[in-house]
Image (spheres, rainbow, N blue to C red):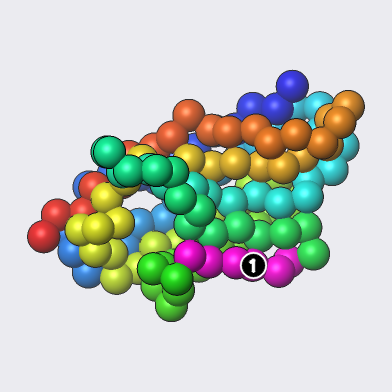
Amino acid sequence: QVQLVESGGGLVQAGGSLRLSCAASGSIVSINAMGWYRQAPGKQRELVAYIASGGSTNYADSVKGRFTISRDGAKNTVHLQMNSLKPEDTSVYYCYVRATVYATSVYWGQGTQVTVSS
């Protein structure tokens, strides 16, 4: 019903930048929020950032001031600009969307690896 395609992960040195993108497609009636979670090996999945339909944003304390989330509403795409990356940002990053098709549900992307070397 809803497909999410992520791009932009990769390997970067500490202090560098990466930009993740996620495009949602399918029989979407409306989108309530889009965002990113991440999960490192042996750790629980944690919220990184989200942006609501009205434009409000929320960030994990660990990424505030370094990451910026934005959305292209016309294209149902969300971006995560990650600056000043640290080795502890190394994780698989998962895009999600809370969208209404026949009912409101959360849909997940396949995940993209971000590796920050020291």
Corner quadrant of residue 70: bottom right
Q: Residue at x 70, y 32 (%)?
A: 25
Query: Foreground residue, 35 or 39?
Result: 39
Residue 63 position in % (x across, y down): 41, 68
Residue 47 position in % (x across, y down): 50, 53
Q: Quick one: SS at disc 1?
A: strand
Whether residue 19 is situated above or below residue 84 in the rendered picture: above
Query: Foreground residue, 53 or 39?
Result: 39
Q: Residue at x 21, y 54 (%)?
A: 116
Magenta segment = 55-60
Give the residue type that dot 1 points to. Thr
Answer whether residue 16 is visible to the viewer in this image: no
Whether residue 101 is situated above or below residue 49 in the rendered picture: above
Q: Residue at x 71, y 69 (%)?
A: 56
Whether residue 73 is situated above or below residue 2 in the rendered picture: below
Answer whether residue 51 is visible to the viewer in this image: yes
Q: Residue at x 65, y 50 (%)?
A: 34
Is the residue marked by circle 1 packed among few (<14), some (14-19), or many (20+) residues within 10 Å?
Answer: some
Residue 114 position in % (x across, y down): 30, 46
Corner quadrant of residue 98: top right
Corner quadrant of residue 99: top right
Residue furthest bottom in the image: 65
Question: As drawn, is 37 to the left or to the right of 117?
Answer: right
| Image quarter in which the C terminus is found | bottom left
Query: Foreground residue, 117 or 38?
Result: 38
Which residue is denoted by mark 1 in the rendering?
57
Question: As drawn, is 20 to the left or to the right of 53?
Answer: left
Residue 81 included in the magenta stretch of the image? no
Residue 6 position in % (x across, y down): 49, 38
